[in-house]
Amino acid sequence: MMMVNLYPLKEFRLPVVAECINPDIFHGKSLKEIEALEAWEGNKKKRLGDLFKVEVENTGSDQEATVIKINGDVSCVRRIGASMKSGEIIVKGDAGMHLGEEMRGGKITVYGNVPGWAGSMMNGGTIEVHGNTGDYLGAPYRGSTEGMKGGKIIVHGNVGREAGAHMKKGIIKIYGCAGQFVGFRMKGGTIYVQKDCEARAGACMVDGTIIIGGRIESVMPTFTIEGLRKKVKVEEGEVIEAPFYLFIGDLTENGRGRLFVAKEPNPHLSHYEKFL
């Protein structure tokens, strides 16, 4: 196994674009080759070794996956793990925008917070954030409809707006609260929000599943109530044993998306029961 430790040489004040921080790119390279990889600090081209102290340790077979450990605050460093296919990245601190963008495999773990577009247009692999994330979790860039197509994102804190927008496959699990427009224009996959969710969940969705375990401000009028369920399956091996309202929509899009909303935290939705 190849283990690479990165230590920021300073507090970054300008955005750093370092998509070279990728196990697939590091794999098989020497210390000097890794230090020579290209990155950008603001509008200045830099070597990775100009920005980070790099330590390389090789143990075991060269065929084993590469592990990158980033020690420190890299909240200004963007595109870490972009398009990665294998290996692992561990960030001991905050990470920057576009973490794991178009990721296809491997795992990224962040022990801190991550701003916008984490897991954007993700195709596979796993991202786990032990903190909060910003807007557009797993979502595409503005103007694009290429949402998440696979993989798993787990956030132990809160997320911003439009998590899972345009999502087609995969799963997003949020163990905190979520902002507006969760699952906007969703076409498939599953989004689970354990705590509270702001309004307009599932707006314009046509398929897929959204599960809200806490309070939701309101259910959009373009959803119709389908029934009351005693339990809901999040994924294989994870079932929530509690009553949930099941809504179907978004009917303005002829959608058949499933919006599960926990009954107990939402007494203001009890008037829907007369339609069952």
Image (spheres, rainbow, N blue to C red):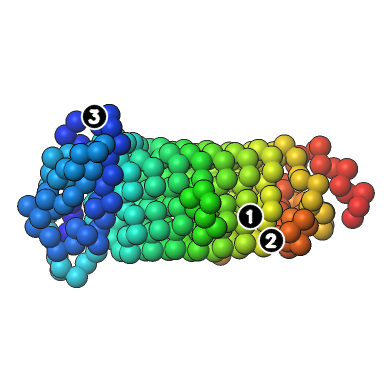
Where is residue 91 shown, x and y percent of the image? Answer: 30, 44
Query: How many C-alpha atoms fall within 10 Å of the one at disc 3: few (<14), some, or many (≥20)?
Result: few
Using residue 231 as the reference point, say whether residue 43 is left or right of it. Answer: left
Towards the viewer: 76 or 95: 76
Badge 2 amino acid: Val
Where is residue 43 shown, x and y percent of the image? Answer: 24, 38
Q: CA distance from mark 3 to mark 1?
A: 38 Å
The reply to whether dot 2 and dot 1 touch (C-beta < 8 Å) is: yes
Residue drawn at x 54%, y 44% as measured from the top left = 175
Using residue 90 as the reference point, say whether residue 259 is left or right of it. Answer: right
- Give whichever of discs 3 and 2 has the lower sequence position: 3
Q: Secondary structure at mark 1?
A: loop
Towards the viewer: 96 or 110: 96
Q: CA distance from mark 3 to mark 2?
A: 44 Å
Quadrant where the N terminus lies?
Answer: bottom left
Using residue 167 as the reference point, say whether residue 260 is left or right of it. Answer: right
Residue drawn at x 43%, y 52% as measured from the top left = 119
Residue drawn at x 30%, y 56% as measured from the top left = 88
- Circle 1 sits on which residue? 185
Towards the viewer: 169 or 236: 169
Where is residue 274 shown, x and y percent of the image? Answer: 92, 49
Badge 1 amino acid: Arg
In the rendered image, is residue 56 in sight?
no
- Give whichever of discs 2 and 1 has the lower sequence position: 1
Q: CA distance from mark 2 to mark 1?
A: 7 Å
Q: Secondary structure at mark 3?
A: loop
Where is residue 76 shown, x and y percent of the image? Answer: 32, 36
- Circle 3 sits on which residue? 11
Quadrant where the C terminus lies?
Answer: bottom right
- Circle 2 sits on which residue? 206
In the rendered image, is residue 174 in sight?
yes
